[in-house]
Image: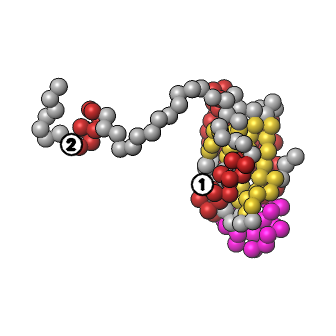
C-alpha cells in the first residue's frame, strides 16, 4: 500500500514498524525469583543491582516507587498501598513470586532526606527498621505464604533488617 505523501515520520514508523533499536527478547514464561521494591533514587541503583546479582537473582519483578518499601509502611495515599498490593498479587499469580525483598535507603527524599533525622545515622536507621517491620507485617497479613525480607541501603552498602 502506498503511503500518503505528507505523512509524518512517526506515522511511517508505525505503519512499517521501523525499529529504533534491535535486540531479541525471550518470550518464555518465567518464575520470578523475587519481587523487589526499591526507591526510584538512582544513587543506590548500582549497589542494589550488584547485590541482587551476587545473590544470583536475575529473574525478578521490580518496582521502583519513591521511598521503596514506604508504599507499604507509610504510603502518601492509602490508594498507593492498595495499588502496590494489587501489583504484588499479579506477580504472585503470573510469575509465582514467593519471595519479597523490600528496600529503603539513607537520605531518601520521600522521607524528607537525612535532615528529617537531624543528620543522625542511628535515628534514621532505627526509623527505617520500624518502617520495614510495618511494611513486612502489612504484606504478610495479606499473603502469609510469602517470605518477606527487608533491607536498608546507605553509602557503605546494604544492611538486612529482617531475619
Ligand atoms: Zn528514596
- The image position of residue 71, as x and y in percent, is 67, 48
Measured Cα–Cα span from mark 1 to mark 2: 35 Å
What's the mark number on residue 93?
none
Q: Indicate whether 40 appears above or below 27.
A: below
Q: Indicate whether 46 appears above or below 21.
A: below
Q: Can residue 98 be seen in this view?
A: yes
Task: Identify the residue at image location x=53%, y=28%.
Answer: 27
Residue pointed to by mark 1 = 40
Q: In this view, does 157 lie to the left or right of 65?
A: right
Q: In which quarter of the image is residue 130?
A: bottom right
Return the residue nearer the eye: 79 or 33.
33
Residue pointed to by mark 2 = 8
Predominant secondary structure, magenta span = helix
Q: Is residue 82 visible?
A: no
Q: In which quarter of the image is residue 127?
A: bottom right
The part of the chain drawn in magenta is: 110-127
- Label 1 CB-ligand 1 distance < 8 A: yes
Task: Identify the residue at image location x=24%, y=37%.
Answer: 12
Return the residue nearer the eye: 82 or 64.
64
Magenta stretch: includes residue 117: yes
Amino acid at each position: 500500500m502506498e503511503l500518503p505523501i505528507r505523512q509524518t515520520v512517526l506515522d511511517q514508523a508505525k505503519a512499517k514498524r521501523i525499529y529504533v533499536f534491535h535486540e531479541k527478547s525471550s518470550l518464555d514464561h518465567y518464575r520470578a525469583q523475587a519481587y523487589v521494591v526499591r526507591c526510584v533514587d538512582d544513587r543506590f541503583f548500582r549497589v542494589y543491582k550488584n547485590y541482587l546479582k551476587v545473590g544470583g537473582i536475575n529473574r525478578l519483578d521490580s518496582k521502583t516507587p519513591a521511598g521503596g518499601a514506604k508504599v507499604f509502611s507509610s504510603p502518601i495515599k492509602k490508594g498507593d498501598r492498595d495499588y502496590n498490593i494489587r501489583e504484588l498479587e499479579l506477580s504472585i499469580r503470573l510469575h509465582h513470586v514467593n519471595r519479597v525483598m523490600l528496600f529503603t535507603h539513607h537520605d531518601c527524599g520521600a522521607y524528607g532526606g537525612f535532615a528529617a533525622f537531624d543528620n543522625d545515622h542511628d535515628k534514621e536507621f532505627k526509623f527505617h527498621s520500624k518502617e520495614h517491620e510495618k511494611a513486612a507485617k502489612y504484606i504478610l497479613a495479606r499473603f502469609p505464604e510469602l517470605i518477606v525480607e527487608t533491607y536498608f541501603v546507605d553509602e557503605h552498602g546494604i544492611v538486612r533488617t529482617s531475619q
